[in-house]
């Protein structure tokens, strides 16, 4: 068995990570429900909603801005869902590491899940760019979407780590089977 004394529940990194993920989950859920509330308000108040968020919008641009804001909120909801998947899955990996056994097949699958969610987050830049280009009525509220090399590198890194964890857990299982 590999030495895992440094990965016990007493490890400050594990404890700090647990706390960070818990706080991030709370913030992400608050964002999610806040966006849902704003979407509902945008339906109830209709064109009176836009000037609350974009005061410089002209009356002629109100329908376009309202549509743009609603689409932007839908993108925000998709981002919150992907972030929820990343955080919940990361919490499971942290729990496994805290138990002293991080190199298991389940964590390889979890890393793959995180990779897919991160890929989804990167791809959500496409609708943001489209909103920025085709909905000028949003003005400064339009999301600034750009290519993120760091984000794409993170996606690649997580998928590679998933393969590393899968190979490592297979090798460990084979080694334990020979003893």
Image (cartoon, rainbow, N blue to C red):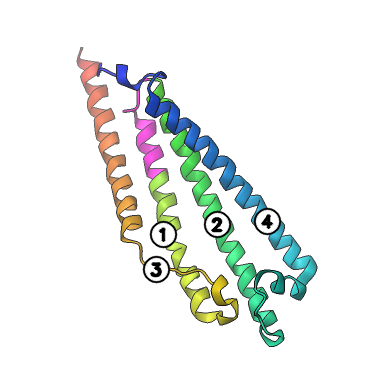
- State yes or no: discs 3 and 4 in contact (Cβ < 8 Å): no
Q: Give the CA distance from mark 3 to mark 2.
A: 18 Å
Q: Residues within 10 Å of mark 2 (few under 14, many from 20)?
A: some
Q: Give the CA distance from mark 4 to mark 1.
A: 22 Å
Report x, y in % for residue 145. Answer: 44, 68
Where's the N terminus, which quadrant?
Answer: top left
Residue 60 is left or right of residue 100, and the answer is right
- Which residue carries the number 1 mark? 122
- State yes or no: discs 2 and 4 in contact (Cβ < 8 Å): no
Mark 2 / mark 1, whichever is N-terminal: 2
Q: Give the CA distance from mark 3 to mark 1.
A: 10 Å
**Helix, strand or loop under label 3:** loop
Name the front one of labels 3 and 2: 3
Residue 48 is left or right of residue 163, and the answer is right
Mark 3 / mark 1, whichever is N-terminal: 1
Q: Residue at x 34, y 27 (%)?
A: 102
- Which residue carries the number 4 mark? 36
Mark 4 / mark 1, whichever is N-terminal: 4
- Which residue carries the number 2 mark? 78
Q: Residue at x 51, y 69 (%)?
A: 143
Q: Give the range drawn in magenta.
A: 100-113
Does 167 appear above or below 39? above
**Helix, strand or loop under label 2:** helix
Q: Give the CA distance from mark 3 to mark 4.
A: 25 Å
- Which residue carries the number 3 mark? 146
Mark 2 / mark 4, whichever is N-terminal: 4
């Amino acid at each position: 068995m590999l030495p895992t004394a440094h990965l016990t529940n007493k490890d400050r990194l594990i404890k700090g990570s647990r706390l960070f993920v818990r706080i991030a989950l709370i913030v992400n859920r608050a964002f999610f429900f806040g966006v849902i509330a704003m979407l509902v308000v945008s339906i109830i108040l209709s064109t009176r909603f836009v000037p609350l968020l974009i005061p410089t919008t002209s009356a002629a641009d109100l329908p376009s801005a309202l549509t743009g804001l609603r689409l932007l909120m839908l993108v925000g909801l998709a981002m919150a869902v992907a972030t929820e998947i990343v955080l919940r899955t990361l919490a499971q990996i942290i729990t496994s590491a805290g138990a002293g056994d991080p190199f298991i097949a389940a964590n390889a699958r979890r890393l793959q899940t995180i990779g897919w969610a991160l890929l989804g987050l990167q791809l959500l830049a496409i609708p943001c760019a489209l909103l920025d280009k085709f909905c000028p009525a949003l003005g400064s509220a339009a999301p600034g979407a750009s290519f993120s090399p760091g984000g794409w590198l993170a996606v690649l890194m997580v998928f590679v780590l998933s393969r590393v964890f899968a190979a490592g857990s297979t090798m460990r299982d084979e080694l334990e089977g020979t003893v």
